């Protein structure tokens, strides 16, 4: 069944005739100039050059030579001192993002075979000058590199002695020493040593006038409850505040002990109030400590108060607890405390999820309705409207707003705020005509720079334009666009305006409506804004202006969308302010519709007959945007069957990116090689069946390709099934647009229609289940939950991507009970599919059964060592319960091996315990990643103008500007290379050692 949505999709096309000619556009790109001065090179720039050269060749050097050269560079970094000239661009290190210094040498460490040799030299140096912090610090670094943890602890103890001799620095250095010791215990200590490290950290924190926040390891997971209790009870008697980032059981025990030993607490433990159901603990802290200073009633008034954020978070959860308990007076006071000086009440996502799990949304909604009816000035309207939407009570919200707006005691500002919120509620309740009437009133007064509500009115105008487009009401669109256009012209920050959300949103809306002329006018106005900043003559041809470059990309995008390739070429060839020499440096820059400049260039080059350059451009786009379907489409159009080998190579480099396999199937299908095409399409689907990372009109492309293949084979019935799946997703995408505009009831209808089209879509089933559950339709919701859970194993590949609205599918005990039944049945069914234990592990994690989850994730990994999401989940469990450091190392390094550029999952490498293994993994990644992209297409005018501008400068300034250009190129190269380029420069232990030595940022300071 098709869903009849009133979408003005036909208007998306761009009318070429409406665009101004490229000649008139080029004439409007101007220059501004003034004079400036620059300084010559410095020793730091020379050092950076030598460090970069060493990095490039150190892997080929014999270990003794590499050790000697590295030490010489280290000494030079220390000798520089802290007074580096920030205008010396040669001195910037792309790997660290800082001026050259000791961190640069950490990013240039030679192979681990050289580390023992550096270590031996460091020992000898420290023996000669035991009081020298630099020598001792080098020794400590090498002890960490060679994993001589006993010696490293002795070196840290020696630093304590050095710190004792300098009272002015003692507290800061002891803070750094304490943090480094704690991390060493975490990574290398036995369970008992980790406990000893925590005890020492508490003692240090108790002696300091700052830094009293102490991180608590998962003591219950490490030692068991009895020993953990003794340690926590002792810590709670000292003037420290505990932060428990890992270990749910440890946090619960700390809370229990703080209540038991309340009379002996020296500091409030607000960070332990991090959820609903902790009112008793909150009230105990409130009783024990002066609410104005967070000190005991008997303490001296000058004792330092605790941090603001933990306290306000605690106030928020206490507010929710009091609402649930029906203690409305206490709730009101807590809400005021939680909102502080702000204008709204910010409720974390986890708090909302907890309300849903406990079935308390209705109680909170009822309380807020009563409260805001009495005190409409309180900052809880957004929270109330959200709850009303969850419960399907938008009409009640409208009635309350109407009642409040009749009051005569509202301030003009509050009345304006409530009128805007009423419009939101009207849209949610599908009272669109009434809402639009309100929009007309809101936008009746012309925009003014003095209007405090200008940004809100502009956003409302753009929404009205979107409603007009979607509901085919062109007069609404005209009203909204007209107001927004006049409003954005008043923006006063020309160097950032094109990236302003309002300008960007207006551009998108204009282009969706097919109003290319208006979009071009807007962009040209932005391009011609005068920043007022003094400029070196020709500066804009050397150093890019981010906002103006965005405007240029948008202009090219308009010509590209209008199918005017010759004008695209003119923009590339004749604009002299791109501030780069070649398209390769801009290929990933995207216009407001998400089209990359590299693809625009490729299409123009193809139209002009320059097929080699077009192919090079599209390859560069894929290298930087490996999920961009239009780039693949152009590649296969250009290369035909010869692209198969290239697509195979892409798939081998990134086994979790399905796009090369999708487009290989397209090529094979065109060649009528149906079986290989089907195999390739099915392999693509298996990687990520839900395909949730893709945008509108690209999601489930593999299903559409497979349908074409099956039709070619004559299997029309199977092909129709896949086509219905794609149609259902497109319908749900249209419903997502309705949801974005605030038409929640219509969006919900759209999701139901999509489900009727194809009921085996996990994402649609889960989306409906979540919404039905929130609105109180529990029985109907459970039916959809069960079907969603049954479909999940087939919808999740080695890397899963949740679609919009599916993230909270496990919320609530009823949903979890259904999931438990389904997933246990799958696991007990002797399946060989790793998705079965993975899904049960996923559920266990959501239930807080972290140790059980770890066992199941390990089982999934044992069944499939390439299961990227299982590795990620196992690694992430370390923040919930104790995992052995060696196991976390294995997980992190495996994640890095499988996804080195973090295109599919996220992880941290800054706490890997085995530094040698980390170095080798980074080195392997560096060997495999592609070098700087080869030139694609020279931007003739831009390159010529840049060189002319450089040539016209005085010699010293010319050299400095050239260095700046080179620095920018290095930084761009680093971004393309990924985390491997940084080496060990970001590891927490090594950075901590630099802090212990008194070295920071890009500066060096020898002693």
Image (cartoon, rainbow, N blue to C red):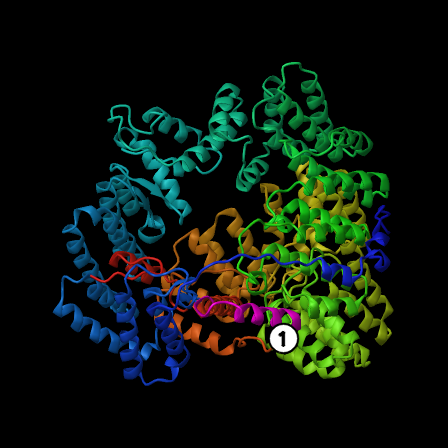
| Residue extent of the magenta highlight | 937-957
Pick whichever, 637 or 233, lies toward us: 637
Pick whichever, 760 or 177, lies toward us: 177
On the image, the x and y values in percent for residue 337 come to: 46, 27
Disc 1 is placed on an element classified as helix
Q: Is 684 above or below relative to 857?
A: below
Q: Is 669 above or below relative to 501?
A: below
Pick whichever, 811 or 888, lies toward us: 888
- Name the residue carrying label 1: 651
On the image, the x and y values in percent for residue 282 come to: 40, 30
User: Residue at the spot x=58%, y=31% of the render?
Assistant: 360
Is residue 699 visible from the viewing direction of this image?
no
Q: Is residue 950 located in the magenta-colored stretch of the structure?
A: yes
Q: Is residue 941 located in the magenta-colored stretch of the structure?
A: yes
Magenta segment main secondary structure: helix
Q: How many residues crowd around disc 1 within 10 Å: few (fewer than 14), some, or many (20 or more)?
A: some
């Amino acid at each position: 069944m098709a869903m009849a949505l009133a979408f003005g999709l036909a208007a998306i096309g761009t009318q070429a005739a409406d665009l101004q000619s490229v000649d008139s556009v080029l004439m409007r790109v101007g220059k501004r100039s003034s004079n400036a001065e620059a300084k010559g090179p410095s020793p730091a720039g020379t050092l950076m050059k030598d460090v970069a050269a060493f990095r490039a060749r150190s892997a080929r050097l014999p270990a003794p030579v590499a050790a000697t050269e590295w030490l010489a560079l280290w000494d030079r970094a220390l000798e520089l001192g802290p007074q580096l000239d920030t205008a010396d661009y040669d001195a910037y290190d792309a790997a660290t993002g800082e001026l050259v210094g000791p961190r640069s040498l950490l990013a240039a460490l030679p192979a681990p075979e050289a580390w023992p040799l550096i270590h031996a030299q460091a020992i000898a140096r420290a023996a000669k000058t035991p009081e020298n912090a630099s020598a001792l610090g080098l020794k400590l670094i090498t002890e960490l590199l060679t994993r001589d943890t006993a010696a490293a602890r002795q070196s840290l103890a020696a630093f304590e002695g050095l710190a004792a001799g300098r009272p002015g620095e003692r507290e800061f250095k002891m803070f750094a020493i304490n943090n480094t010791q704690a991390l060493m215990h975490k990574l290398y200590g036995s369970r008992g040593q980790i406990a000893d490290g925590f005890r020492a950290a508490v003692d240090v924190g108790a002696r300091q006038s700052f830094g009293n926040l102490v991180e608590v390891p998962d003591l219950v997971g490490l030692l068991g409850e009895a020993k953990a209790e003794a340690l926590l009870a002792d810590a709670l008697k000292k003037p420290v505040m505990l932060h428990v980032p890992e270990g749910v059981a440890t946090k619960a025990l700390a809370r229990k002990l703080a209540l038991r030993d309340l009379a002996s607490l020296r500091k409030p433990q607000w960070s332990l109030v991090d959820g609903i159901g902790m009112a008793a603990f909150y009230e105990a802290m409130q009783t024990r400590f002066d609410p104005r200073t967070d000190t005991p009633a008997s303490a001296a008034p000058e004792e330092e108060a605790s941090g603001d954020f933990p306290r306000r978070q605690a106030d928020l959860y206490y507010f929710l607890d009091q609402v649930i308990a029906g203690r409305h007076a206490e709730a009101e006071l807590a809400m005021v405390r939680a909102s502080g000086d702000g204008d709204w009440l910010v409720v974390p996502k986890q708090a909302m999820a907890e309300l849903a799990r406990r079935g308390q949304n209705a109680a909170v909604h009822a309380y807020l309705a009563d409260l805001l009816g009495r005190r409409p000035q309180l900052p809880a309207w957004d929270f109330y409207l959200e709850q009303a939407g969850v419960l399907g009570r938008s009409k009640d919200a409208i009635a309350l707003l109407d009642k409040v707006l009749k009051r005569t005691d509202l301030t003009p500002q509050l009345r304006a705020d409530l009128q805007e919120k009423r419009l939101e509620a009207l849209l949610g309740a599908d009272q669109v005509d009434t809402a639009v009437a309100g929009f007309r009133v809101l936008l009746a007064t012309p925009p003014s720079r003095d209007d405090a509500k200008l940004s809100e009115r502009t956003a409302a105008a753009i929404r009205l334009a979107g409603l007009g487009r979607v509901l085919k009401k062109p007069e609404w669109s005209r009203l909204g666009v007209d107001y927004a256009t006049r409003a954005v012209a008043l923006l006063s920050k020309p160097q950032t305006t094109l990236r302003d959300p309002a300008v960007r949103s207006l551009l998108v809306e204009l282009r969706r409506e097919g109003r290319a002329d208006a979009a071009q006018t807007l962009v040209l106005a932005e391009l011609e804004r005068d920043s007022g900043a003094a400029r070196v003559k020709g500066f804009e041809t050397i150093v890019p202006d981010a906002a103006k470059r965005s405007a240029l990309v948008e202009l090219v995008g308009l010509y590209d969308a209008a199918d005017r390739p010759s004008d695209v070429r003119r923009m590339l060839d004749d604009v002299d302010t791109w501030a780069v020499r070649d398209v390769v440096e801009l290929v990933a820059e995207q216009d407001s519709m998400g089209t990359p400049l590299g693809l625009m260039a490729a299409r123009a080059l193809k139209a002009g007959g320059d097929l080699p350059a077009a192919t090079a451009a599209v390859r560069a786009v894929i290298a930087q945007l490996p999920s961009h379907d239009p780039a693949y489409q152009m590649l296969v159009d250009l290369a035909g069957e010869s692209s198969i080998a290239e697509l195979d190579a892409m798939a081998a480099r990134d086994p979790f990116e399905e796009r090369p396999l999708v487009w290989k199937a397209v090529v094979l299908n065109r060649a009528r090689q149906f079986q290989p095409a089907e195999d390739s399409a099915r392999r693509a689907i298996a990687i990520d069946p839900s395909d949730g990372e893709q945008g509108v009109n690209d999601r489930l492309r593999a299903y559409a390709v497979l349908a074409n293949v099956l039709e070619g084979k004559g299997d029309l019935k199977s092909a129709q099934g896949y086509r219905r799946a794609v149609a259902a997703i497109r319908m749900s995408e249209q419903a997502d647009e309705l949801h974005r505009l605030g038409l929640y009831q219509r969006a919900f209808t759209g999701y139901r229609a999509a489900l009727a089209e194809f009921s085996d879509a996990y994402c649609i089933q889960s989306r409906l289940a979540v919404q039905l559950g929130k609105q109180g339709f529990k029985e109907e919701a459970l039916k959809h939950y069960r079907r969603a859970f049954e479909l999940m194993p087939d919808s999740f590949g080695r890397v899963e991507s949740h679609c919009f609205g599916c993230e909270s599918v496990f919320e609530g005990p009823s949903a979890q009970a259904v999931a438990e039944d389904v997933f246990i049945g799958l696991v007990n069914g002797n399946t060989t599919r790793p998705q079965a234990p993975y899904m049960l592990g996923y559920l266990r994690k959501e239930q807080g059964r972290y140790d059980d989850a770890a066992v199941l994730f390990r089982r999934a990994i044992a069944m499939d060592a390439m299961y990227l999401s299982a590795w990620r989940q196992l690694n992430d469990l370390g923040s919930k319960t104790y995992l052995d450091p060696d196991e976390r190392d294995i997980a992190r390094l495996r994640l890095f091996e499988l996804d080195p550029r973090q295109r599919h999952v996220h992880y941290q490498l800054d706490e890997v315990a085995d530094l040698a293994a980390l170095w080798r993994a980074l080195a392997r990644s560096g060997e495999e990643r592609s070098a700087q992209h080869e030139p694609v297409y020279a931007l003739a005018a831009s390159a010529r103008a840049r060189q002319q501008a450089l040539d016209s400068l005085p010699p010293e300034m010319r050299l400095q500007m050239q260095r700046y250009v080179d620095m920018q190129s290095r930084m761009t190269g680093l971004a393309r290379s990924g985390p491997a380029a940084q080496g060990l420069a970001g590891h927490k232990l090594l950075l901590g050692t630099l802090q212990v030595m008194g070295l920071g940022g890009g500066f060096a300071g020898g002693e």
